[in-house]
Image: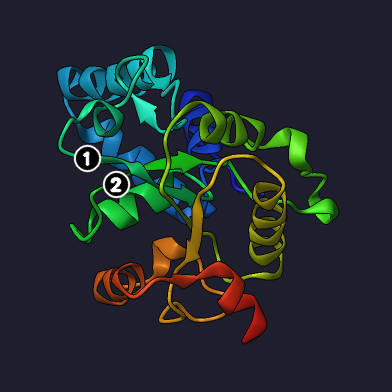
Amino acid sequence: MQNYSSKLFENAVNQIAKLPSIGRRTAIRLALHLLKQSKEDVAVFTSAITAMKEEIFYCNTCRNISDSEECEICRNPKRNASLVCVVQDIRDVIAIENTNAYQGVYHVLGGVISPMHGIGISELNIQSLFDRLQQQTVAELVLALPSTTEGDTTAYYLFKHIQTMECKVKVTTLARGVSVGDELEYTDELTLSRSLHNRVDFESSIMHK
C-alpha cells in the first residue's frame, strides 16, 4: 500500500488508475504531470472530457460517435450508402477510416455475441441492423468482425438471419489477411486495406474454414 502526503493527489491517482491499461506507476506519473500544468491547461483538459461525456451522440443510423444525431460519415453524400461495413465497435471504424481504402458507411454492433461474458443478441445493435436492411437499399454488407470464436459466431448468426429476410443483399467478409484471433484495431493499415479490397463472399469463406 502506497502512502501519499496528499489525499487530493491520492484521489486523482485512484481515478486515473481506473483507465484501461493504466497501472499505478503510470497513474502517478500522469497525476504529477497534470499537477505541473497551469490551471488553464488543466481546465481545458477536464472541460474536453466533460463535454465528450455530456454532449456526444451515437449516430441514429450507424451508432458511431458523433457531434450530432447523425455522424459525418452517414451525412456525407460522397459515401456509398449501399455498402455497409459491420464492425464490433467504434475503434474498428477509426482503424478502417485510417486506411482511406473504404468509401461506404458503417454499422457498429457495440460488441460481439459472447455467452461467457453475458453478451447476447439483445445487448448488441443487431435488430437495428436488420431494420436498416429492411428500410434502406443495401447492395453489400461487409462483415468486418474480429477473427475470434465470438466474432465468427456473430458473423454466422447475422448471415443466417439475413438469408431469411426478404431483402436481397450480398454478404461478404474481409480476406484473411487479418490473422485468426486478431482485433481490427491492432491490424496494420496496409493489411487491413488489402483485406477490405480483396473481401470475399461470406458463404464461401465458411466452406473454406
Image location (x, y in percent) of residue 83: 36, 47
Image marks 1 and 2: residues in contact by CB distance under 8 Å: yes
- Quadrant housing residue 72: top left
Q: Kindly identify the amino acid type of the residue bearing the numbered disc 1.
A: Arg
Image location (x, y in percent) of residue 148: 64, 70
For label 2, the crowd category at 10 Å Cα-Cα, with few meaning under 14, some 14 to 19 and many 20 or more, is some
Give the alpha-carbon distance from disc 1 to disc 2, as whole Å: 5 Å
- Quadrant housing residue 101: bottom left
- Identify the residue at horizontal 23%, vertical 56% (top origin): 98
Nearest the eye: 71 or 129? 129
Nearest the eye: 119 or 131? 131
Q: Earlier in the sequence, mark 1 or mark 2?
A: 1
Residue that lies at the very extreme toward the bottom in this rendered image: 208
In this view, 115 is above or below 3? below
User: Which of the labelled discs sits on residue 208, or is there none?
Assistant: none
Q: Quadrant of the C terminus?
A: bottom right
Nearest the eye: 28 or 4? 28
Badge 2 marks a residue whose secondary structure is strand
Q: Which residue is mark 1?
A: 79
- Identify the residue at horizontal 45%, vertical 20% (top origin): 60
Q: Kindly identify the amino acid type of the residue bearing the numbered disc 2.
A: Gly
Image-based side of 157 in relation to 196, left or right: right
Q: Which residue is mark 2?
A: 104
- Identify the residue at horizontal 49%, vertical 81% (top origin): 179
Colouring mode (rainbow / by chain / secondary structure / one colour): rainbow
Count of residue discs: 2
Badge 1 marks a residue whose secondary structure is loop
In this view, 171 is above or below 55? below
